Amino acid sequence: MKQIKIADTTLCREDSAFSFKEKIEIARQLEKLNVDVIELPEIKNIKTDILLVRTISSFVKNSVISVAAGITAQSIEDAAAALSSAAHSRIRIELPLSPVGMEYTCHKKDAKMIDWIDFAVKSAKGFAETVEFCAADATRTEEDFLIKAIETAVSAGADCVSVCDSASVMLPDDFADFISELEEKISLPLGVKCNNKNGFAEAQSILAVRRGANCVKTAVGGETASLETFASIIKNCGEKYGFCSSVRYTELNRTVKQINWITENAKNEKTAVTVQPSESSILLDKNDDEAAVAAAVTALGYDLSEEDSAKVFNEFKRVARKKNAVGAKELDAIVASAALQVPATYKLVSYVINNGNIITASAHITLDKNGKNMEGIEIGDGPIDASFIAIDKIIGHHYELDDFQIQAVTEGKEAMGSAIVKLRAGGKVYSGNGISTDIVGASIRAYINAINKIVYEEA
């Protein structure tokens, strides 16, 4: 039985407007579905994109996390930095090989492109567990040059190769013949990515599999072959034609619905910004007065006293002098650090996290309350979820999690991460902030910080 690998590209969709949290949730759903590879785009923002990949790496232990490298040496190093904690890492060298694509995207001629492929694959090889070479417009590339580019990548150490019909210029049977010819000339596993502009993507993909391809790139929504449709083809036809996949078919429909819901929600939020006030429309600067800042804080869900409002405004003025604009996320961080600073009822003593690809994540948390150590041990859906449940067990209460944000506050491979937790109690929102090079540790500190504010006010 031939095992077909599925590489999902949902998080690479150019038409998406996913938030940080939505990207994490999509990755979580794909890991549950057991897709072989979760693909992520090139690192554009050093702070947030690297933090995103590292956060996803904290709970994705079965799937390969694949990050695209751009057309510079720095982009390869950035991809490597992002993947430093991934259980299974891959760097994708994605390049156009048609004359037009090379000229306008990479500003390179044939010879220079061959040199770059050799350099890029060799560089990436030292940074990741596997390296993939991907010909972005293979069906519009001259055959001899395509073969030469792939052979160069193979010689440089690539572990797998993918070819794309990004322009959707081939009918399914012609694409199958194209793959068959390539498969005879290269020794590495061959993957395909087909555009669904003409409605042929799934047909192209499954015929390519029958003619030698062993990996298919899919997505939920967008123009790439549909994850749900292609996985269903394997499920329904695999036994007869001798192929299978590792996808959990019992989870397929539910997972796709969940990702579609996230996608539609992201689209609605994107369009809503222009027609009605919302968190995402908050944008303040140094000229805004205390009333404007207080109104923005209220829009975020906080109900602050006059004293705390004054503290928030003073901190806002300090931040606004250094930045041209202060948005919702910055204002959240200001409230978390400046408002309702209280004596700590609960103090973090220690935390031990167990997580891996063959065990359920567990957290052993020890808190100090009035000089007495209190322990909680729980399992959860990832290390952060397990930690929050363990803390709830210790304090004997569960508060509604209103929001959870993670963002980088420093740059580099050992970037410092800031976590903001917003809890809702008695109709009010309380935020806590935690900072650490360890994302789990920052999240635990933020959760405890928010709980201490609730406990203090309730007392």
Image (spheres, helix red, strand yellow):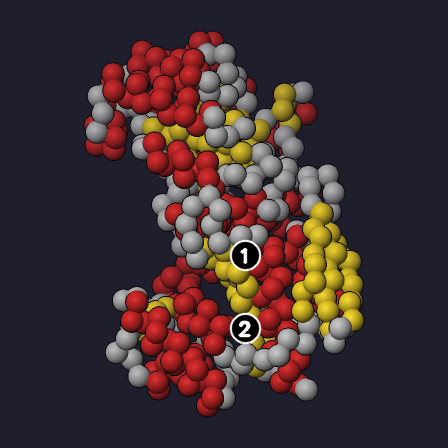
In the rendered image, which quarter is residue 141 located in?
top left
Residue assigned mark 2: 431
**Residue lying at the far front of the rendered structure:** 371
Please report the residue visible at 34 percent of the width from the left and 74 percent of the height from the top. 318
Q: Find out whether the residues at labels 2 and 1 contact each other: C-beta distance under 8 Å.
A: no
Give the quarter of the figure containing the N terminus.
top right
Q: Is residue 284 left or right of residue 158?
A: left
Q: Which amino acid does label 1 sit on?
A: Ser
In the rendered image, which quarter is residue 370 located in?
bottom right
Q: How far across and how far down the image is residue 237, in percent?
A: 63, 28
Q: How far across and how far down the image is residue 100, in percent?
A: 22, 27
Is residue 228 positioned above or below 135 on the image?
below
Q: Earlier in the sequence, mark 2 or mark 1?
A: 2
Residue assigned mark 1: 436
Disc 2: CA contacts within 10 A as few (<14), some (14-19) or many (>=20): many
Judge by depth and name the residue closer to the eye, 458 or 358: 458
**Residue lying at the far bottom of the rendered structure:** 306
Q: Is residue 338 left or right of residue 168?
A: right
Where disc 1 sits, the SS reads strand
Q: Is residue 403 in view?
A: no
